[in-house]
Amino acid sequence: MSRLEKAIVSMVEVFEEYATKDDKNRQLSGTELAELMKKELASPEFHGKVEPAVLQEAMTNLDKNHDGEINFREFSMFLATLARGYYRARNKGKGNKGKPDKPE
Amino acid sequence: MSRLEKAIVSMVEVFEEYATKDDKNRQLSGTELAELMKKELASPEFHGKVEPAVLQEAMTNLDKNHDGEINFREFSMFLATLARGYYRARNKGKGNKGKPDKPE
């Protein structure tokens, strides 16, 4: 598999690993999510790139249907938001080589 | 960094690598996307898991603003759709240990 395919598989595997700790295997409970965040999204290197406001935005949008549980759709959107924050931080100030920068 | 953080970084790095081949560095052109798909999303192992209909859905939704270019927001949503397809294929038929399966 390519690195991009491996990245997608990692997203799925991490979700499955934490979601199956209680008896609802297809959702992350609040506790499972907190544990995932602590173990999987806590490195200073990563946090140095993702602004707190981005993490806050991602967390706020996380439980779209407000049932206190996070299914894989919500989790995948959460990761997409974090990825955008990471991308923006890495590309701050880099325009399009003289062309107007397309809004994100 | 954790495997999840590395997965997010890979998503960003792959986009940057292909988007910077022409002079619009913050978007993927059709050609750049086609090359990315051919090199990064083509393994039989991955395609064996992601149903063609999922890939079609992801491609259809890819250029949300129909400008013929893909920015990172659109790309991150595209990957989230592929990840959901991969997750569904892996968890087909696996309920929640006796509980009604929450719709995706």
Image: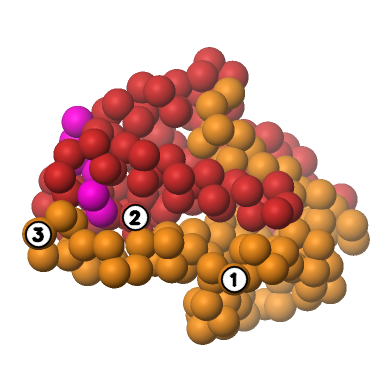
Chain colours: A orange, B red
Image point (39%, 66%), residue name: A88
The quarter of the picture where the C terminus of chain B appears is bottom right
**Amino acid type assigned to the residue bearing label 2 in the image:** Phe
**Amino acid type assigned to the residue bearing label 3 in the image:** Lys
User: Front-most of B70 and A25?
Assistant: B70
Residue under pointer 1: A48
Residue B49 seen from this side? yes
- Residues shaded magenta: B25-31
Label 1 lies in what chain? Answer: A
A57 w.r.t. B104: above or below: below
Residue under pointer 3: A99
Q: Nearer the viewer, mark 2 or mark 1?
A: 1
Residue under pointer 2: B72
B64 w.r.t. A100: above or below: above
x and y percentages locating residue A13 in the rendered image: 72, 43
x and y percentages locating residue A17 in the rendered image: 81, 49
Residue B30 lies in the magenta stretch = yes
> Cα distance, mark 2 to mark 1?
20 Å
Task: Confirm whether circles 2 and 3 share one chain.
Answer: no
* A85 relative position to B18: left or right: right
Task: Confirm whether circles 2 and 1 share one chain.
Answer: no
Residue A84 seen from this side? no
x and y percentages locating residue B66 in the rendered image: 14, 52
Image point (81%, 62%), residue name: A39
Q: Secondary structure at mark 3?
A: loop
Label 3: how many Cα within 10 Å (few below 14, some 14–19, many 20+):
few
Q: Are marks 2 and 3 in contact (CB under 8 Å)?
A: no
